[in-house]
Image (cartoon, coloured by chain):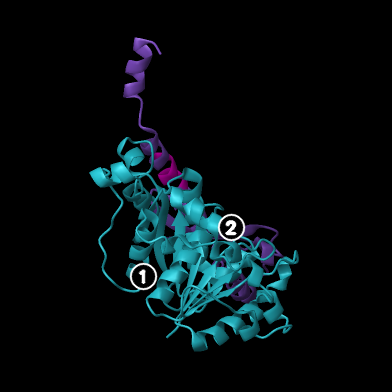
Amino acid sequence: MSLLGSIFKSYRKKSASVAKERLQVLVALERSSRAGMPDYLTELQEDIFQVLAKYFPVERDQVKVQVEHQDGCEFLELNVPIVELEAGGGYTIRTQTQSA
Amino acid sequence: MAKVIVVTSGKGGVGKTTTSASFAVGLAQKGFRTVVIDFDVGLRNLDLIMGCERRVVYDFINVIHDDANLSQALIKDKRVENLYILAASQTRDKDALTMEGVESIIMELKKSFDYIICDSPAGIEKGAFMAMYFADEALIVTNPEVSSVRDADRILGLLDAKTFRAKNGDEPVRQHLLVTRYVPSRVEKGEMLGVNDINDILNVPLLGVIPESTQVLQSSNAGLPVILEAGTSAAQAYEDAVCRIAGENRPMRFLQERKPSLLQRIFGGG
């Protein structure tokens, strides 16, 4: 190895700290995506549909519930487009609940 | 009260079966009535590591299917008192392992044992799920490799969500981290993830560190759980970890490179 090469090699990051950084990023990402798909979401979705269906003509698959991540916060996002049968127009319920 | 401990990892080849065997022996040696169950249906190997492969007549699935009763299927260890092995079936039918079957066997074993060690198969398929489902505590085995640490984290997610305790809102499965194949000199050189690094990533209390040891392969060659090779570093590390899981306080060892003593240099070993 050339002298220059060996100097650069000594400046290169140790592989263990590279491994740690990569894993920290990956694990954080995978944990948050796990948290975004918990079993309760499907149940919550169904419950919300049942309640809304009492008041509005709404289709089951139009009730969308998901967990979003932004700036270190988790947002529960509920999205339900409701079409008024007579008027032809529509309106949407949008709500965001913030949890730590 | 009997305790069910699952030995799990996600990744294969990190030392689940070696750990299950040594923990079962260690707990039995401490006087606890212990049974170790192989959950790897189709690829049983615990019997080989425990050195009782020629004594398997009935297995786990035979008991589930009522082809044999538990006392016929339990293999009594010849070296250690209080220790029994339940072998996995070699059937290729993975669905042979039913939730109801596993539950009834574990409930039955709880009546007469202090510790039930469940040796999980690799992966996150049915066998791994069954092995962890009824656990009170979990030993997460990982070595200092990126793939192994990542897979361990996936298992942590399953333990938090897919076990009996999680589903019933009971106190969560108590998690312990066991790091295997550890080489302190490589950690010092920055070539290998250290226990603190792994802990920063996984955030699970460290139960023990098993140093890389040539003895592990030799013990499995002989069908002798490595903890029985008294005096070797791997055996000492497993003894420590067993004591800790039983509630004793033991300082961590094998985190630094040991300089061989003059005697060891002359006579070898270590």
Task: Determine whether the residue tagged by mark 2 lies in a helix, strand or loop.
Answer: loop
The chain ID associated with circle 1 is B
Closer to the camera in the image, B97 or B41:
B41
Work out whether residue A30 can be spotted: no
Q: Position of residue B138 (x, y in %)?
A: 45, 67
Q: Residues within 10 Å of mark 2 (few under 14, many from 20)?
A: some
Instruction: Identify which residue is drawn at 28% across, 72% down.
Output: B248
Examine the rendering and report whether any part of residue B231 can be seen. Answer: yes
What residue lies at 44% left-to-right and 44% top-to-bottom? A23
Tell me: residue B151, above or below residue B162. Answer: above
- Write down the residue under mark 2: B122
In the picture, residue B59 is in which quadrant? bottom right
- Region in magenta: A21-26
Residue nearest the viewer, comparing A62 with B7: B7
Residue B135 as seen in the image, left or right of residue B58:
left
Quadrant in which the N terminus of chain B appears: bottom left
Horizontal relation, residue B64 to residue B245: left or right = right
Which one is earlier in the sequence, the residue at label 1 or at label 2? 2
Q: Please name the amino acid that badge 1 sits on.
A: Ile
Direction from residue B123 to residue B187 in the image, left or right: left
Residue lying furthest front: B267
Q: Quadrant of residue A4?
A: top left
Label 1, on which residue?
A: B245
Chain A display color: purple
Residue occupying the far bottom of the picture: B111
Q: CA distance from mark 1 to mark 2?
A: 23 Å
Q: Provide the chain ID for the residue under circle 2.
A: B
Looking at the colours in the rendered structure, which chain would you say is drawn in cyan?
Answer: B
Q: Position of residue B151 (x, y in %)?
A: 51, 52
Say which amino acid is labelled 2: Ala
Q: Nearer the viewer, residue B201 or B210?
A: B210
Give the crowd class for mark 1: few <14, some 14-19, many >=20 residues within 10 Å.
some
